[in-house]
Protein backbone atom coordinates (compact mmCIF):
# COMPACT_ATOMS: atom_id res chain seq x y z
CA UNK A 1 0.00 0.00 0.00
CA UNK A 2 0.99 3.59 -0.44
CA UNK A 3 3.08 4.84 2.46
CA UNK A 4 4.61 1.44 3.29
CA UNK A 5 7.83 2.32 1.55
CA UNK A 6 10.45 2.07 4.28
CA UNK A 7 11.79 -0.90 6.22
CA UNK A 8 10.38 0.24 9.59
CA UNK A 9 6.82 0.45 8.28
CA UNK A 10 7.19 -2.80 6.35
CA UNK A 11 8.43 -4.46 9.56
CA UNK A 12 5.32 -3.29 11.43
CA UNK A 13 3.09 -4.67 8.69
CA UNK A 14 5.03 -7.96 8.70
CA UNK A 15 4.63 -8.32 12.50
CA UNK A 16 0.86 -7.83 12.27
CA UNK A 17 0.20 -10.48 9.64
CA UNK A 18 -1.56 -13.29 11.51
CA UNK A 19 -3.61 -15.30 9.02
CA UNK A 20 -0.95 -15.46 6.30
CA UNK A 21 2.78 -15.18 5.81
CA UNK A 22 4.59 -12.89 3.36
CA UNK A 23 6.07 -16.00 1.72
CA UNK A 24 2.68 -17.67 1.06
CA UNK A 25 1.64 -18.10 -2.53
CA UNK A 26 -0.95 -15.56 -3.69
CA UNK A 27 -3.32 -18.27 -4.95
CA UNK A 28 -3.22 -20.01 -1.54
CA UNK A 29 -4.35 -16.83 0.24
CA UNK A 30 -6.66 -15.23 -2.33
CA UNK A 31 -9.32 -17.62 -3.63
CA UNK A 32 -10.05 -17.56 -7.34
CA UNK A 33 -13.58 -16.28 -8.04
CA UNK A 34 -16.16 -18.73 -9.33
CA UNK A 35 -16.92 -18.50 -13.02
CA UNK A 36 -20.58 -19.12 -13.81
CA UNK A 37 -21.09 -19.05 -17.54
CA UNK A 38 -24.65 -19.34 -18.72
Image: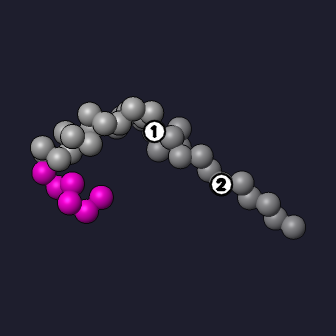
Secondary structure, magenta segment, majority class:
loop
User: What is the secondary structure assignment of the residue under circle 2?
Assistant: loop
The residue nearer to you, when weighing 29 against 15, is: 15
Tell me which segment is drawn in magenta: 1-6
Query: Measuring 27% from the left and 38% from the top, which residue is drawn there?
Result: 14
Badge 1: few (under 14), some or many (20 or more) residues near its Cα, within 10 Å?
A: few
Residue 33 in which image quadrant: bottom right
Residue 7 picture location, percent across and down: 13, 45
User: What is the secondary structure assignment of the residue under circle 1?
Assistant: loop
Above or below, comparing residue 10 to residue 24 in the picture: below
Q: Which residue is mark 1?
A: 25
Query: Measuring 13% from the left and 51% from the top, which residue is drawn there?
Result: 6
Verify whether residue 28 appears in magenta.
no
Check the picture and name the quadrant holding the N terminus: bottom left
Give the foreground label among 1 and 2.
2
Above or below, comparing residue 16 to residue 2 in the picture: above
Residue 8 picture location, percent across and down: 12, 43
Label disc, if present, on residue 33 of the rendered structure:
2
Instruction: Say whether marks 1 and 2 touch (CB < 8 Å).
Output: no
Amino acid sequence: PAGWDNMKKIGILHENLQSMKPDDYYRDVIAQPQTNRK
